[in-house]
Amino acid sequence: MSVNLQQTIKPLLYQPMNEPLPAPERLSAVQGVVFDAAGDQPLREARTAAKASTDCLFLTRVPSAENVNEHDLGVLLASGVDGVVLAGCRGPADIQRIDVMLKVTEAAAGIPQGRTALLAEYATVPESVLSPHPLAGVSSRLSALIFDAAALAEACGCRRVTEAGDVPAVVRASRAAAVLRACEAGIAAYEMMPADAVDEWALRRLWINSLENGFSAGALRSWQQIDLLAAAGTLPEI
């Protein structure tokens, strides 16, 4: 299988807590920026100014489906977000629950139905890996799955990589499950790059490995990683 390193799908960027939003020209390097609901959110005016010169999406990461309600989502939609990222997704029921709440909050806010995108961190908890239920057709707004090996390893009480340098079986199985579920549903799959990957060529190897294993693109944890991939020729320079 050949791998096109200049992917049409740009990476996602999980914005580090309490760091300022970069200039609009830097935002054009990513598909979307994910902010944590518990952290500082950029002002609506800042979003509007950035959207005038870039198609970058502004997304907010929300806690598990059991720990978010219509009021929480209403506040986020009022701030001008383009979509939400559901953490700890356990399967179709969680996605359907968020989808229904988004429909209600969109209607209340006068926002066109389905405008708010939904992405899900998937195969990061055992329940989603073991779920026999497909994601295809669960929600028309579901556009991508995000796999985070570190989150899955923590949930299973193991390490992302063993001391011997091996990848635990549960991580391998979950990684494959994320790709297969995304393929089945016809949506994108992102793989989270390790936070400690701050070497240009090591990060490039991880990125290429993700693409070779069926992921659409990577999800990055810092603007430094964006710059490193650009310097390595994996992403367009910004």
Image (cartoon, helix red, strand yellow):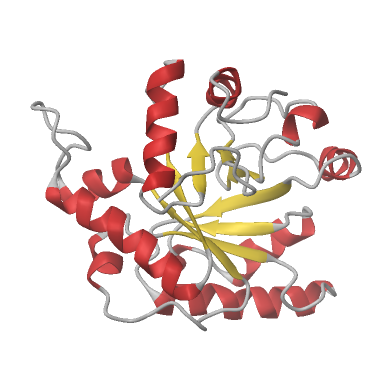
Identified at 85% across, 75% down, the residue is: 110
Front residue (pair 15, 213)? 213
Side (left or right) of 84 relative to 123: right
Q: In the current view of this chain or complex, which residue is farthest to the front?
A: 2
Side (left or right) of 134 relative to 114: left
Side (left or right) of 123 relative to 140: left
Identified at 63% across, 72% down, the residue is: 141
Q: Position of residue 174 (x, y in %)?
A: 26, 57
Quarter of the image that includes the C terminus? top right
Front residue (pair 82, 12)? 12
Q: Position of residue 215 (x, y in %)?
A: 44, 51
Q: Quadrant of residue 121?
A: bottom left
Q: Quadrant of residue 139?
A: bottom right
Side (left or right) of 109 relative to 89: right
Q: In the current view of this chain or complex, which residue is farthest to the left?
A: 164
Identified at 84% across, 38% down, the residue is: 50
Q: Position of residue 16 (x, y in %)?
A: 55, 30
